[in-house]
Amino acid sequence: MTRIRRGYIAWRRRTKIRLFASSFRGAHSRLTRTITQQKIRALVSAHRDRDRQKINFRHLWITRINAAIRERGACHSYSRLINDLYKRQLLLNRKILAQIAISNRNCLYMISNEIIKEVSWKESTETELPGE
Amino acid sequence: MIAYATSSSAMFAASHKNPLLSTNHTTTTTNRNFQIRCQRNLAPVEQRWMFTDSNFTGPDVWNKTWYPKAEDHVNTEKTWYVVDATDKILGRLASTIAIHIRGKNLATYTPSVDMGAFVIVVNADKVAVSGKKRTQKLYRRHSGRPGGMKVETLDQLQQRIPERIIEHAVRGMLPKGRLGRDLFTHLKVYTGPDHPHQAQTPIDLPIRDKRIQKQT
């Protein structure tokens, strides 16, 4: 029997995977079996971290807003700011607030002063209602 | 009111070139002493056709969370703080120091970048602890060989190497890793009342904790 090569089918499949892992370090971009494994791991990480990315960024924004607000004084905190935001029904989300905190700190202080004033005014007027 | 709007109108009055298509160096001044530097606000090459007839200028603030550039965390321009550790509770002091070194009190906090300040601690041997910790708190270390565990109490360590107490406390509160080890080098602890960093003009560390001073 003559020797029959298997052709280019497997080679073509592996080249696509090799292209994906072409920037990996060391054997992870050179050895075929390792390349397939590392491509799977990379895609799994990417899938899981796309969801974690949303969580991580939200944590970062919260930390930044907290830091910016606490510089104002002892009674200011992120939790009170968010509470006042909800009471005033202001729809600014944490991403925008964090970017405002970095680029234009005065604006953030103006916003927080406005909502604190409004909330304290509303609370003082609510306590005057009869029927308690 | 937003700083970008004023800079954009000024730029358009000056020239009709779209800044996203040509090199441009802008610095946006903000509150306090912090200045965000945004250089080379160019759009990527394959996206420049989108910006040919629009008047966007500067980086996209509302869709890209700010990340510090190299100019935003040069070590030579960071603030230096000085703390006197006399009669301050060890853990509370270490906590405040770690927060300032890590940069968590700044709105520009980034976990992957060293944005914190330098902290100098003087009079480290006079730091206070409550309760019976002075004779009962143990500091352990291991030499790596079997039976090589060495145990010391706080007052023994204070007589030997007083700086190590505060360093140990702060190191436990900083992140562990490459960045954490670099952050630890920003802490300078001295036993006596003076320090060799007069040239950096350190300012007093603002302490918000009310219970940090030992009640005598």
Image: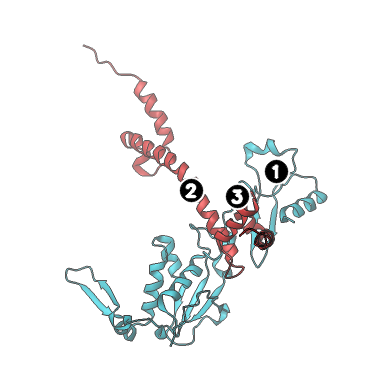
Chain colours: A red, B cyan
Check if mark 3's residue and mark 1's residue have beta carbons within 8 Å. Answer: no
Label 2 sits on what residue type? Answer: Ile
Q: Position of residue B97 (x, y in %)?
A: 47, 72
Q: Residue furthest right?
A: B13
**Labels 1 and 2 within one chain:** no
Q: Residue furthest front?
A: A131
Q: Is residue A5 left or right of residue B14?
A: left
Classed neighbour count for the residue bearing mark 1: other residues with Cα under 10 Å, few (<14), some (14–19), many (≥20): some
Per the rendering, the mark at residue B146 is none
Q: Position of residue B7 (x, y in %)?
A: 75, 54
- The answer for how far apart the CA atoms under marks 2 and 3 are is 14 Å
The structure residue drawn at horizontal position 41% and vertical position 37%, both measured from the top left corner, is A43
Question: Along the polypeptide, which appears first: circle 2 or circle 3?
Answer: 2
Q: Which residue is mark 2?
A: A55
Q: Which residue is mark 3?
A: A93
Of B193 and A110, nearer the camera is A110
Q: Which residue is mark 1?
A: B21
Q: Can residue B186 be spotted in the picture?
A: no
Q: Kindly indicate the quadrant of the structure image that contains residue B167.
A: bottom left
Label 3 sits on what residue type? Answer: Asn
**Labels 3 and 1 within one chain:** no
Q: Position of residue B95 (x, y in %)?
A: 45, 71
Q: Position of residue A33 (x, y in %)?
A: 31, 34
Q: Is residue B135 left or right of residue B55?
A: left
